[in-house]
Image: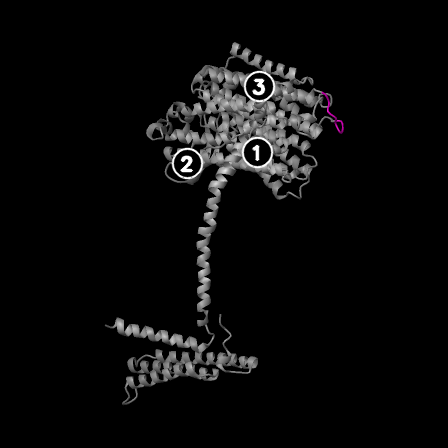
Amino acid sequence: MNYTEILIIPLIPLAVFLVLGIFYSRIKPAVSGIIGALGLLISTLLSIKVAYQYFFVFSNDGVAYQTLVHKTVWMNFTETLRIDMGVLLDPISIMMLLVVSIVSLMVHLYSRGYMKGDPGYTKFFAFLSLFTFSMYGLVLATNLFQIYIFWELVGVSSYLLIGFYYTKPTAVAAAKKAFVVTRFADLGFLIGILIVGFYTGTYDFELLNNPEGSPILSWAASSFFGMSVLSWGLLLIFIGGAGKSAMFPLHIWLPDAMEGPTPVSALIHAATMVVAGVYLVARLFPMYYFVEEGIILQVVAFVGAFSALFAAIIAITQNDIKRVLAYSTMSQLAYMMLALGVSGYEGEAGLGYMASMFHLFTHAMFKALLFLCAGSVIHAVHSNYLKDMGGLRKYMPITHITFLIAALAIAGIPPLAGFWSKDEILVAVYEKNTLLYIVALLVAGLTAFYMFRIYFGIFWKRDPEYASTPHESPATMTIPLIILAAFSTLAGFVPFGEFISADRMVLEAHINLPLALAAVATGMAGIGLAWLFYRKETGLPEKMVDALGKLYTWTYHKFYIDEVYLFVTKKILFKRVAEPAAKFDRQVVDGTMVGIGNSTVRTSEKIKGMQSGKVQDYAMAFVAGILVIVIFFVYYLTE
Amino acid sequence: MIHDVSLYEILTVTSILFFIGIYGFITRKNLISILISIELLLNASVVNFVVINKYLYPDVLQGVVFSIFIIAVAAAETALAVGIIINLYRQISSVEVKDVETMKY
């Protein structure tokens, strides 16, 4: 493997970020868009080349895929504990490399049309490049600390991009919220890293993930509150991942993050950054699986199942199309977590792991496509709300067809991408736990329902009163849509098990016909219900709202999770903890320091008369001093 | 070596000279008088240097050479002080110590 090429992949976006950032005002907007897209095109081509070399040239049949590492020591603590910087190549990091490259390239191309005329055009591309660089760094990280550094960097770029329209108060609030909530989760991540580092003596993924290595084998050596210390560390790391991947109850930032420009939502909050949490669990999967017989994986599975259902239910009632997509993202991410949670390690048992990564891959394609289509729609009607849309299939044929493909893909209709990956997940869950399988199947139905609710709402229904006739977006925006639609159609045919599996061996995935039929039937039922409800103005939805009453209100207000957070922070934390602490700081700590300063001033005010300005007074004092010293020497030292 | 005069007698004289200098420095009201007192102090120490050199280490000349140094430095210092006093007189038409006490807190 040529490591220079691999190092160039993340360094190109970094260089683009620096160039656009430094020469911000001197670069014409059109040029900055081309620089950004061109740089990423090179990175994408290199990623594809690396993937080709790794999977087809370098691989040797019948043997597990190797982990290739190229690193240098960055900080040395002890003989074994040190922090490295480098690149790590294994099947999942290369898969992520491809996902990040392709989606980011499409978003760059699309943004050239979508952001046209925006005063912050160059800034936007600079931030996008910064994000892409950080994401590359995250997926290629060789150890926990490196992943943490880039983890925070993607958090910062996400913050910058959510708050891109910084004159809008809601955008600023959303950016702040996203940063604070994920930062809070990252505190758990950091403590987890420190615990794991302390008890195993290494941060290196290769050493940590070796099933026969000492970090995994020695998990029982120490315990804390009935669980192995290492399990606690992994749980804390999972909290960090849950924060980034918007798992319940740390999901509250994701819907608000939709305040950012739509291409950003497609890139960061659908396809790449939010899957970092799933990627983290997958990266440490052998640890999660072997330490204490996978106790934390069960937590992962149940949190995933609950979040999937929770988000899918909320998604049905939202009227902002981007928020529906945001909850859908959360639900699908939870699906991936669920699949990881039920996965085993060896052979056929590792199906969940493979399914999770497969779904990550296909989801990135169709969800990015859904967001970009939504952006195209919003571009045309200048509103996020369903009530301002309708009948758009006549005006925007390309957006309509691509959105339909993506919606069918996410609903799990064969032969589109979502069907294959979702089917694998359902099979994996079915083999492990029937309750979770029912939840997952229900979520699949709900997914189809809410997706087709907004599909019919946007493209069918009656026309609202448009101020000006909506028209199809320019070619810069529709071409990425078509490319992503092609990916969404074809990605499912990739024989994923041959490339990615928990134990790195080739995994033959088969379609389990009854389960597949059940999944498709559920998806079709969801679509059918949506057709019945939203195809025409039937008044059925209103009747349902009346029938459900309180339940609807609760769901519409997202089960008041935001309000609970506000109550806990404002009423309890701020009032009971922060305010007394501030008072103590102002009165006791500051008071002491100011008091010392004041008493010094008062004392010097009193004794300053001693400095008279008369030379002879000083001479007197000098002579008197000498006399005292002389007397001292004569009487005390010459005894 | 002066015949029939011991080191202690000469040191007594220079001590008296020194304390007269200190007394003058502290009590005089005129800046010029203070300058003269400082000269007394310096001369007392110069005589000490020479005499101690002569009585204790007659075969070396370091004390004598040093006294010449002190005389040179004293001349420079006096020139500086007189310059300051003349400038002061041009400003406030006085060379009294009590008029020069503005340099305080």
* Residue A344 screen position, x and y as percent: 43, 19
Which residue occupies 67% across, 44% down? A26
Which residue occupies 63% across, 17% down? A530
Q: Of the numbered discs in the image, which one, if any, rests on residue A446?
A: 3
Q: Amino acid at mark 3?
A: Leu
Question: Do discs 1 and 3 belong to a common subunit?
Answer: yes
Q: Amino acid at mark 2?
A: Leu
Q: Main secondary structure of the magenta part?
A: loop
Residue at the bottom extreme, as displayed? B4
Q: Is residue A416 left or right of residue B67?
A: right
Q: Earlier in the sequence, mark 2 or mark 3?
A: 2
Question: Do discs 2 and 1 belong to a common subunit?
Answer: yes
Q: CA distance from mark 1 to mark 3?
A: 32 Å
Secondary structure under tag 2 reads helix
Q: Is residue A427 magenta?
A: no
Circle nearer the viewer, 1 or 3: 3
Reading the image, the residue beneath label 2 is A194
Circle nearer the viewer, 2 or 1: 2
In contact (CB < 8 Å): disc 1 and disc 3? no
Nearest to the observer: residue B60 or residue A427:
A427
Reading the image, the residue beneath label 1 is A132
* Residue A76 screen position, x and y as percent: 41, 40
Question: Do discs 2 and 3 belong to a common subunit?
Answer: yes
Q: Earlier in the sequence, mark 2 or mark 1?
A: 1
Residue at the right extreme, as displayed? A468
- Identify the subunit bearing mark 3: A
Give the extent of the magenta segment. Answer: A462-469
Could you classify mark 2 by the number of other residues whose Cα lies within 10 Å: few (under 14), some (14-19), or many (20 or more)? some
In contact (CB < 8 Å): disc 2 and disc 1? no
Q: Amino acid at mark 1?
A: Thr
